[in-house]
Amino acid sequence: MNDERFPGLHRRGFLAATTGAATTLALTGCGGSGETATSDGAPRHGGRLRAAFAGGGASETLDPHLASLFADAARAKALFDKLADFGADLSARPRLAERWESNKTLDRWQVTLRKAVFHDGKPVTAEDVLYSYRRIADPKQAFRAKASLEPIDLDASRATGERTIEFVLKRPTAEFPNVLAAFGAYVVPENATEFDDRPIGSGPFRFVSFAPGRSAVFRRFDDHWDGAPLLDEIEFVVANEESARVSALLGGQVEYAHELNPTTARAHEGGGQIEIVRLRNSAMQAFCMKTDRAPFDDKRVREAFFLIADRQELVDGALSGAGEIGNDLFGKGYEYYAADLPQRTQDLDRARALLKQAGAENLKVTLDTSAVAAGFTEAAGIFRDQAAKAGVTIDVRMGSKDSYWSDILDGGTLCCYRSGAMPVEAHISQRLLTDSTTNATKWRHKDFDALYQQAQSTRDRTERAAVYGRMQRRLYTEGGFLVWGFADWIIGTASSLKGVEAKAPANTLDWARFDRVWLA
């Protein structure tokens, strides 16, 4: 299922363009209004960039704490700042926070803010941060980052100066900077409650106009702490259908089209009309086995399924080759990922032998899937055929796009699954601890929970990485996630758009970051 906390790749639009909605292109101006690049391609100031995203219709908001769609996140990133954000390896990087430091027991953290100002010229202060976090944590609201901020005791946390904050935590948390970088944990001015008329943030762009479901225009903020953007303006336009985003890009109506499918990318890659940018390792692709019920309560059956999978065939067939193979662990290329484990390959003889040992010869199992995410139905069909070669009969059951993620959290025994980018630590805490709220594999082991607490109580990074390595070796041997691949996230750009970062998985700092791009 999709993550409910982080990058939440949510069915409304994170991993598939919003379905059934009218396609809207609201274009108010042209992209070449300012200076152009010099003949040597050096960055230059000026111009309006037009970026097309799938949107959320008339209910869209600029409230950064409500962001759930990719379009929401991109607009929030332009207008607002967080204390930290995730680098390409999913480690936390300082943003509004200049530095952070913990006490010896890792349950109190001192955060010092850098000198930054809001769009109205007022300084960003510790009180703004505490107000923002308390607003997110309001039990009467359903703000996106609420679960991420849970480790903080916000009643006990306090401002110790205009730009210094003492965060008191409920338990030792070595990865506290991940909390500061959490999806949706934006800092807003103290007492701010309205965001759609004239929102005030501290981001690289300031508000000009907003028409929900149609467009938003933001202008360069010259006093941004990280330097002013190169662009004069950015316009976010809504185009819910992928074909509309591609057509707008080809027709010169936009310079950036978010979320293209692999077939489109192949058709245009190297063709000269548009540029294709592939953000690697953006989405884990997996089959999820429920470890608390037959047949997957027997680890020999789980290992057999690991060995049934031909991962390259799944990547080629279900992702049209737009990705790379997985190794039954989340977070390939991310901080703490156990890259030293041998790549698992298909071994049907060994799989049949394990099934025989488990008394599961002629096994029949239902695989739940849905058209809720690209490649799901294709992956189910491919894996069904692979399993048949090991004597396993898989019945593919199609689920509702509207209720799939809630249906498969507790129901069924085997399902298609995907996840966006998040730290390995966050994947463990959200999905693999006994009390994790999105524990789709029903992996519940007190000794595994204890290892997580040990990691979170370990100050030394090398020692902490060793604990995470132990946890991943166990998951590799007997876990419930059959991680067969990692999908590219595909973006199309005009040849005139320069500086788009190609090494940032979706939802990381440099994804949809428009303060460092320019129009040539």
Image: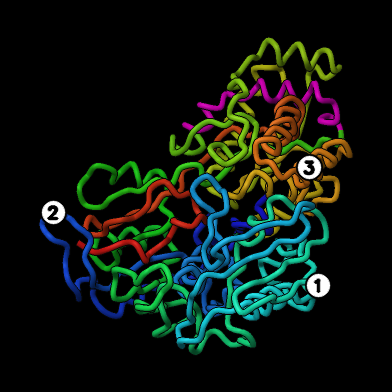
Q: Is residue 325 depicted above or below 422 in this figure? A: above
Which mark sits nearer the N-terminus, 1 or 2? 2
Estimate the spatial distance between the alpha carbons at disc 1 and disc 2, rounded to whole Å. Answer: 55 Å
Q: How far from the left and from the top, in percent, is residue 209?
A: 41, 85
- The image shows a total of numbered marks equal to 3
Q: Which residues are magenta?
A: 294-316
Residue 319 shown in magenta = no
Residues at badges 1 and 2 in contact (C-beta under 8 Å)?
Answer: no
**In this rendering, would 241 be left or right of 62?**
left
Q: How is the image coloured?
A: rainbow
Residue closest to the eye, 141 or 89? 89
Q: Secondary structure at mark 1?
A: loop
Q: How far from the left and from the top, in percent, is residue 443?
A: 81, 39
Kind of residue sitting beneath label 3? Tyr
- The residue that label 1 is drawn on is 156
Q: How far from the left and from the top, in percent, is residue 82?
A: 56, 67
Q: How far from the left and from the top, in percent, is residue 63?
A: 57, 78
Disc ID at residue 108: none
- The residue that label 2 is drawn on is 40
Q: Quadrant of the C terminus?
A: bottom left
Q: Residue at x 53, y 37 (%)?
A: 333
Query: Closer to the camera: disc 1 or disc 2?
Result: 1
Q: Residue at x 65, y 34 (%)?
A: 329
The local crowd at label 1, few if under 14, some if 14 to 19, many if 20 or more residues have their Cα within 10 Å, is: few
Q: Residue at x 59, y 57 (%)?
A: 7
